[in-house]
Amino acid sequence: MNHGKSFEELWEDLQQVLVQHLRLQYASRSKHAAIQMAERKIDHTDIQYVVKNNLPDEMYKPYEYPYGEHPFSNLDPVFSITGQDKRGRWITVVVVVRIRRDRLHFGIITAIAPVSPKSRHRNAECPVPVALSW
């Protein structure tokens, strides 16, 4: 992974827009995310709260996301944010950042809860800044 400074410098702006998109329900959800959220009883407000109050713990440039059904096939940057919801439950939210028709678009790929104390997400020492590049 590239550990550039660009992502770190952009996070505050990205976070603000992502929270706004979540609040307005502009962010899409993959079929997988919708199923996982329903099964794990994670609602939209849980996602918003975690995104608004935490830093990303992982970020992958295009073709570097090593998880899911098709590893290393992400066309766009993917990042995960882990934190506690209002009830204290640990949740990881995985988000894709896309630019389509010159507009920023966010999509929820999956949401994980509960997050095990042994999870790589809970044990991240600090956010890994990565340059956003398309």
Image (cartoon, grey):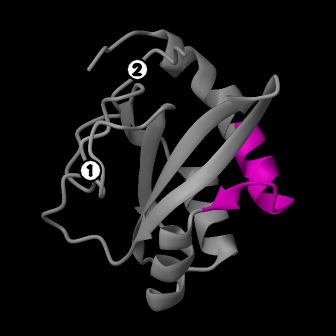
**Horizontally, is 9 left or right of 122 in the view?**
right
Residue drawn at the location 52% of the way across and 14% of the way down = 133
Taking the magenta stretch, the answer to whether it contains residue 25 is: yes
Q: Residue furthest right?
A: 24
The region drawn magenta spans: 16-29
Nearer to us: label 1 or label 2: 1
Look at mark 2 in the image and give the residue it sits on. Answer: 130
Mark 2 residue element: loop
Q: Is residue 38 above or below residue 89?
A: below
* Residue 39 % position (x, y): 45, 89
Q: Is residue 11 above or below residue 52?
A: above
Of residue 15 and residue 133, the one placed in the foreground of this image is 133
Mark 1 residue element: loop
Residue drawn at the location 48% of the way across and 32% of the way down = 75
| Mark 1 or mark 2: whose residue is earlier in sequence | 1
Look at label 1 and name its amino acid. Tyr
**Horizontally, is 128 left or right of 39 in the view?**
left
Q: Is residue 74 above or below residue 134?
A: below
Residue drawn at the location 23% of the way across and 39% of the way down = 125
**Horizontally, is 14 left or right of 21 in the view?**
left
- Count residues near mark 1 (Cα–Cα under 10 Å), then give few for <14, some for 14-19, many for 20+: few
Residue drawn at the location 53% of the way across and 48% of the way down = 95
Residue 85 in sight here: no
* Residue 33 % position (x, y): 51, 69
Look at label 2 and name its amino acid. Val
Q: In 3D space, how far apart are the residues under numbered discs 1 and 2 (Cα atoms)? A: 18 Å
- Count residues near mark 2 (Cα–Cα under 10 Å), then give few for <14, some for 14-19, many for 20+: many
Look at mark 1 in the image and give the residue it sits on. Answer: 67
Q: Residue furthest left?
A: 118
**Image quadrant where one finds the C terminus:** top right
